[in-house]
Image (spheres, rainbow, N blue to C red):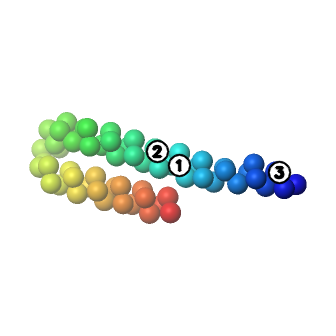
Amino acid sequence: MNQTIKEHSWIPLILVCFATFIIALDTTFMNVSISSVIADLNTDVSTIQSISSFYTLITASFML
């Protein structure tokens, strides 16, 4: 019984680490694509960066 509890106690930590990795990967992709998004939407860098920051904050708040 005690061994089963120890084995399952790592599962939430692994899930949080995986979610953090996915958010970091998504943010990296968004930062790399800023130049093409600016060209496609005819906007400036500060607007796209603020949208990217808001998106990251909202995603992180949902993760919590």
Question: Mark 3 or mark 1, which is nearer the start of the sequence?
Answer: 3
Which of 53/11 is in front?
11
Label 3 to label 2, Cα distance in Å? 28 Å
Q: Is residue 18 visible?
A: yes
Residue labelled with disc 3: 3
Label 1 to label 3, Cα distance in Å? 23 Å
Q: Secondary structure at mark 1?
A: helix
Residue 52 placement (x, y as % from top left): 28, 52
Q: Residues within 10 Å of mark 1 (few under 14, many from 20)?
A: few
Say if mark 2 contacts mark 1, CB within 8 Å. Answer: yes
Q: Is residue 34 left or right of residue 11?
A: left
Query: What is the three-letter code of the residue carrying label 3?
Result: Gln
Question: Mark 2 or mark 3, which is nearer the start of the sequence?
Answer: 3
Residue labelled with disc 2: 21
Residue labelled with disc 1: 17
Q: Residues within 10 Å of mark 3 (few under 14, many from 20)?
A: few
Q: Secondary structure at mark 2?
A: helix
